[in-house]
Image (cartoon, rainbow, N blue to C red):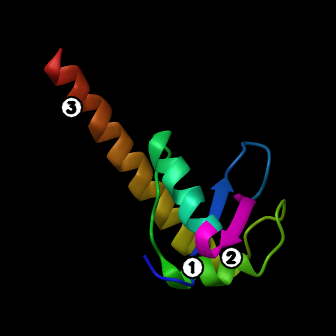
């Protein structure tokens, strides 16, 4: 991992227009945040450019409109992978 690692977490509640920034950090704290997420089965996507753009915004803010397409792609990929993982588990039963 890079020394200047950034980590930004997002949440997309049903009652908001866009995902919210729920946490952000850098350096060793970012590394720890990613480690904890992975240990708890929370999807982690590495995108340095997107993390840089989102990290300048405040926790609790909606993501900027300029990032909607990129973030939608991330959420779509996560949803696809989680659906396939569930289907794979069902096949193993």
The answer to whether residue 14 is left or right of residue 40 is: right
Q: Which mark is residue 80?
A: none
**Front-lying residue, 21 or 79:** 21
Q: Going 79% across and 44% down the picture, which residue do you hit?
A: 15
* Disc 2 residue crowd, few under 14, some 14–19, many 20+, Cα 10 Å: many
Quadrant the N terminus occupies: bottom left
Q: Please tell me whether residue 24 is drawn above or below residue 83 in the rendered image.
A: below
Above or below, 71 against 56 in this view is above
Location of mark 2 (residue): 54
Label 1: which residue? 50
Residue 25 within the segment the image draws in magenta: yes
Q: Pointers 1 and 2 in contact (CB under 8 A)?
A: yes
Image coordinates of residue 27 in percent, x first then y, are 61, 76
Estimate the spatial distance between the alpha carbons at disc 1 and disc 2, rounded to whole Å: 6 Å
Q: From what the image shows, is residue 35 above or below residue 64? A: above
Point out the stretch of residues depicted in magenta: 18-28
- Element at label 2: helix
Quarter of the image where one finds residue 19: bottom right
Q: Nearer the viewer, residue 21 or 41?
A: 41
- Please give the residue where the numbered disc 3 appears in the rendered image: 88
Q: Nearer the viewer, residue 38 or 47?
A: 38
The location of residue 25, given as percent across then percent down, is 69, 69
Q: In terms of sequence position, does the residue under pointer 3 or pointer 1 come before the other? A: 1
Mark found first going from the N terminus, 3 or 2: 2
Q: CA distance from mark 3 to mark 2?
A: 33 Å
């Amino acid at each position: 991992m890079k020394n200047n690692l950034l980590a930004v977490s997002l949440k997309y509640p049903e009652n908001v227009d866009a995902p919210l920034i729920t946490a952000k950090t850098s350096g060793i704290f970012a590394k720890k945040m990613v480690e904890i997420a992975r240990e708890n089965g929370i999807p982690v996507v590495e995108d340095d450019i997107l993390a840089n753009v989102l990290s300048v915004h405040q926790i609790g803010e909606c993501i900027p409109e300029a990032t909607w397409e990129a973030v939608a792609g991330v959420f779509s990929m996560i949803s696809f992978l989680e659906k396939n993982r569930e289907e794979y588990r069902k096949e193993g039963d």
